């Protein structure tokens, strides 16, 4: 099941800027709307992968991964 996130985008002067509402720090700037959406997607994936890796490093001992749908 794919997770959905909300991109808030805006056209300012010669630039498109945007960010992902649910994940602080995921924001980008590009010349076109299409480039912005692609860059946001790539940056979001990288941020999520980083969070998973960071969480795994914090764990000591045995642990269990459980998916919870909301």
Image (spheres, helix red, strand yellow):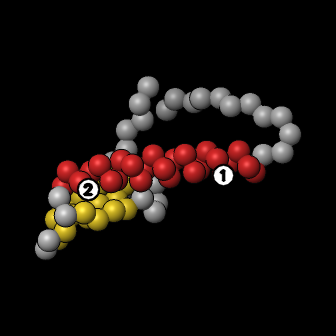
Residue 22, visible in the rendered structure: no
Q: Which mark is residue 54?
A: 1
Q: Is residue 65 or residue 68 the one in the foreground?
A: 65
Question: In the rendered image, which quarter is residue 52 located in?
Answer: top right
Classify mark 1: residues with Cα within 10 Å, few (<14), some (14-19) or many (20+): few
Residue 6 against residue 32 in the figure, above or below: above
- Which residue is denoted by mark 2 in the rendering? 36
Q: Is residue 68 or residue 54 the one in the foreground?
A: 54
Q: Residue furthest left?
A: 13
Answer whether labels 1 and 2 touch (C-beta < 8 Å): no
Q: Residue furthest bottom?
A: 13
Q: Position of residue 20 (x, y in %)?
A: 37, 54
Q: Position of residue 3 (x, y in %)?
A: 42, 35
Q: Which mark is residue 35?
A: none
Question: In 3D space, how far apart are the residues under numbered discs 1 and 2 (Cα atoms)?
Answer: 26 Å
In-image side of 1 versus 36 (left or right): right
Q: Determine the residue positioned at 59% across, 50% down.
A: 51
Quadrant where the N terminus sits is top left
Q: Determine the residue positioned at 57% across, 51% down.
A: 50
Residue 53, visible in the rendered structure: yes
Q: Residue furthest top?
A: 1
Q: Is residue 43 or residue 64 the one in the foreground?
A: 43
Label 2 residue SS? helix
- Label 1 or label 2, whichever comes before in sequence order: 2
Classify mark 2: residues with Cα within 10 Å, few (<14), some (14-19) or many (20+): many
Question: In the rendered image, which quarter is residue 17 located in?
Answer: bottom left
Q: Position of residue 6 (x, y in %)?
A: 33, 48
In-image side of 44 versus 65 (left or right): left
Residue 56 against residue 66 in the figure, above or below: below
Q: Determine the residue positioned at 19% across, 68% down.
A: 15
Label 1 residue SS? helix
């Amino acid at each position: 099941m794919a997770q959905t996130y909300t991109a808030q985008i805006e056209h300012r002067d010669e630039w498109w800027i945007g960010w992902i509402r649910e994940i602080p720090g995921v924001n980008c700037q590009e010349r076109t709307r299409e480039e912005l959406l692609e860059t946001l997607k790539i940056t979001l994936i990288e941020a999520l992968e980083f969070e998973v890796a960071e969480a795994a490093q914090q764990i000591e001992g045995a642990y269990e991964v459980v998916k919870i749908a909301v």
